[in-house]
Amino acid sequence: MARKKCEHPHEEEAGEAWLLPYSDLMTLLLALFICLFGISKLNAGKAAQMSASFQSAFNLGGPSFFEGAGAGLGQYAQIGSSADGGIAAYLAENEQMEHTQEKIQEYIKENKLEGELSVNITEGGLLVRISDKALFPSGSAELLPESQKIIPIIADMLGTMQQQVLISGHTDNVPIATSRYPSNWELSTDRAQSFMRLLMARNPKLDAKRFSVIGYGEFRPAATNETEEGRQRNRRVEVLVNRSYRMPDSAQKLN
């Protein structure tokens, strides 16, 4: 009697196992390219804002007196410069300055310094203005004890940032002529230097290479010199944290 042969079921070759993950990978790549194509059609400025929002949500910075104000700007700069021509870096820096502005405004309100200290964001950067009456006696560059209300908050703020800083002294147009200060130029410059030295003493970690000092005398008034109130506004020290990034012209046109 003939012996019936045992038939084995057909088995796929081992070399065909890669087909399934390969087809899945191709599907995912197709979906990715469709998404990238869709994103490329978005307004570039809006896409940059979305990118900056996602980046800031991951809290790239470390803890500081101004929580969140010292975000990792260098990381933002790399991402922004390579991905969208610096738009994301500009937006991230602006967000950092806005957060710092809010913290200083809270400090001003808590310590009732509205007439002595103010902070604004300008085209040039974050601008802090301090009235001379909060810092110096009339005609002098020797800091008053009351300046200790203001020096610590400014020194700590600057410690959370990496931008270049310009400290400028300003006076009214009333002439001064003393053995030490033959004009308002010398007085305004000396006041700016005194203020910077005390900032450095308060926060030794500040890098002196970031700082510049200038005296403008009466030649950059913030208000009219025709009234006492205006002259008081003009007698001041300003701290300008300069922007490291500018909004590219192409992005401004798109927006």
Image: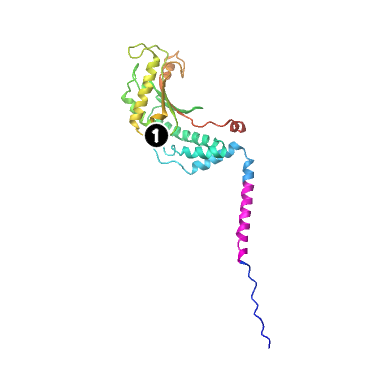
- Left or right: where 198 falls relative to 78: left
Amino acid type indicated by mark 1: Gly
Can residue 212 be seen here? The reply is: yes
In this rendered view, identify the residue nearer to me: 15 or 145. 15
Coordinates of residue 84 in the picture (x, y in percent): 57, 38
Q: Vertically, is 199 above or below 9?
A: above
- Single out the residue that lies furthest toward the left: 145
Residue 197 occupies which quadrant of the picture?
Answer: top left
The span shown in magenta is: 14-35
Q: Is residue 33 above or below residue 77?
A: below
Disc 1 residue crowd, few under 14, some 14–19, many 20+, Cα 10 Å: some
**Is 196 a magenta residue?**
no
Residue projecting furthest to the right: 2
Figure quadrant of the C terminus? top right
Q: Which secondary structure type mostly characterizes the magenta part of the structure?
A: helix
Residue in the foreground of this view, choosing between 242 and 102: 242
Relative to 40, 190 lies left or right: left
Query: Percent position (x, y) of residue 136?
Result: 34, 21
106 or 20, which is in the foreground? 20
Tell me where residue 97 appears, x and y as whole percent. Answer: 47, 33
Q: Is residue 124 above or below residue 83?
A: above
Residue ID at (54%, 37%)? 81
Residue 69, by quadrant, is: top left
Determine if residue 134 is in view. no
Give the x, y percent position of residue 83.
Answer: 56, 40
* Figure quadrant of the N terminus: bottom right
Give the secondary structure at mark 1: helix
Q: How is the image coloured?
A: rainbow
User: Could you tell me which residue is drawn at 40 percent across and 16 percent down?
Assistant: 185
The foreground one among 205 and 54 is 205
Give the number of marks.
1
The residue labelled by disc 1 is: 159
